[in-house]
Amino acid sequence: MGRAYQNRKESMAKTSDTKAKIYSKYGREIFVCAKAGGVDPDGNLALRGLIDRAKKDQVPSHVIDKAIEKAKGGGGEDFAPARYEGFGPGGCMVIIDCLTDNPNRTFGDVRLCFTKTKCKIGTQGVVSHMFDHSAILAFKNDDENAVLDALLSADVDVSDIESENGKITVFTPHSEYFKAKQALGDKLGTIDFEVDEIQFLPRGLTTITSDDDITMFEKFLDMLNDLDDVQNIYHDVVL
């Protein structure tokens, strides 16, 4: 699983190539999260985690504050999640998560990215069953047994745990995210998480060998990332 996560990190570095895109992504996510669960991070753990991630990605405070203020207004924009799945160049598998205020427009835009790069968009569930929807928590610690004990004593379902170079990475099902964070905090005190995310991790990896397919895959990612509604792209390609 660690290799899959490393692959995901490299993918993010490759495709999230503009600060404006990152700021827009976080601004929209924070707005939706605050509007749904409340604007107080102390009472909305999902919002608190999202703000922490935004700060780690060097999103300016004014972007975060603006999104929260917007959510306080109540009305205005109403974004809904949308997920699309399909097959990319070289037979790779792709999941695209969006936040949209116009599902018909977003579906059309995403479908165009597939068709223009000779890819095939599928129905929901066509590839997601080949991914694990996982919560990932990584932090500095060198006592794997103590971390595992903290999680198991709170009945957290641990998918995997890795310890390397003084850092521990915990993988749990996405449904265990808040429970895992609470258990770690209760046993270990305040933790500065280096990674605090929920992602789709592929169960296997695909290597694209054709130069034409590699070029087309890069074009596919670029086109998707140019869409304002696209929040995250998950795939099983080794980069």
Image: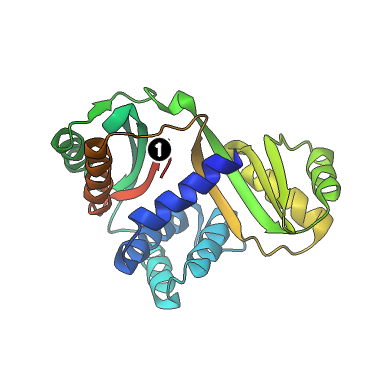
- Image coordinates of residue 26 in percent, x first then y, are 40, 61
Residue 205 is left or right of residue 74, and the answer is right
Which picture quadrant has residue 13?
A: bottom left
Residue 41 is left or right of residue 225, and the answer is right
Look at 23% across and 43% down and name the residue there. 215
Look at 46% across and 72% down and name the residue there. 58
| 180 lies above or below 190 | above
- Number of numbered markers: 1
Q: From the viewer's side, name the closer residue of 178 and 172.
A: 172
| Residue 167 in view here | yes
- Image coordinates of residue 176 in percent, x first then y, are 65, 39
Look at 55% across and 50% down and name the residue there. 197
Residue hosting label 1: 237
Element type at marker 1?
Answer: loop
| Residue 32 in view here | no
Coloration mode: rainbow
Which picture quadrant has residue 118?
A: top left
Q: From the viewer's side, name the closer residue of 168 and 24.
A: 168
At label 1, the amino acid type is Val
| 81 lies above or below 190 | above
Residue 11 is left or right of residue 198, and the answer is left
Badge 1: residue crowd in 10 Å (few <14, some 14–19, many ≥20): many
Look at 46% across and 54% down and name the residue there. 33
In the picture, the quarter occupied by the C terminus is top left
